[in-house]
Image (tube, rainbow, N blue to C red):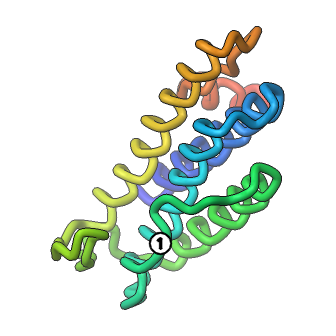
Amino acid sequence: MKDYFLKLLAYDYYANKLILQSIKEMGNPTEPIRLMSHTLGAQQVWLGRCVGDPNAQKGAIWPEWEPDDLYQINEENHQLWVNFLNRETDLNRKVSYVNSKGDSFSDTLSDILAHLVNHGTHHRAQIGQLLKTAELDKLPVTDYIFFIRNMHQSN
């Protein structure tokens, strides 16, 4: 199960890189940058919750990051999540946390990981629609199965 989530995290990182490149090609429009910053900021907040950081809920859910910084943030987030997951022994353990509205919840780590990747997919789709509307010539293919096929071709 851990290998599956590591693969999903690798996919999420890969898809973020593709979308970041498309955003850059379009001249870094404001709304796609805002959505990608949110996606990456939420990754940091969720990691804080998973490691038990009592200040995690104070993390920026909608940070205002510079476009050029997003590549490095994506890289750092990915490494932190991979390192965290490699140390974990129980993906069914409950993670208790407080959300940005002050509500308390407790979810399994595996459900949080699934949410984390789905959250990224959701916002990348929104960004793709914005870029398509702005007439980007060609959107990147960020489907999971294409990622898997590329992985197999590389090996």
SS for callout 1: helix
Q: As drawn, which residue projects farthest toward the front?
A: 30
- Residue 78 drawn above or below residue 13: below
Indicate the position of residue 99 as horizontal and vertical percent values: 27, 70
Q: As drawn, which residue projects farthest toward the bottom?
A: 54
Q: Quadrant of residue 81?
A: bottom right
The residue sitting at 49% across, 59% down in the picture is: 62
Question: In which quadrant will I find the C terminus?
Answer: top right
- Residue 134 drawn above or below residue 143: above
Disc 1: which residue: 47
The residue sitting at 69% across, 10% down in the picture is: 135
- Residue 15 drawn above or below residue 9: above
The kind of residue on which mark 1 rests is: Leu
Residue 8 appears left or right of 98: right
Q: Tell me if I can see residue 155 in this picture.
A: no
Indicate the position of residue 54 as horizontal and vertical percent values: 37, 90
Judge the density around disc 1: few (<14), some (14-19), many (≥20) Cα neighbours within 10 Å: some
Q: Nearer the viewer, residue 93 or 56?
A: 56
Q: Quadrant of residue 25?
A: top right
Q: Nearer the viewer, residue 58 or 19?
A: 58
Question: In which quadrant will I find the N terminus?
Answer: bottom left
- Residue 70 drawn above or below residue 54: above
Q: Tell me if I can see residue 56 in this picture.
A: yes
Residue 105 appears left or right of 10: left
The residue sitting at 71% across, 27% down in the picture is: 150
The residue sitting at 24% across, 69% down in the picture is: 101
Q: Nearer the viewer, residue 153 or 29?
A: 29
Q: Nearer the viewer, residue 113 or 89?
A: 113
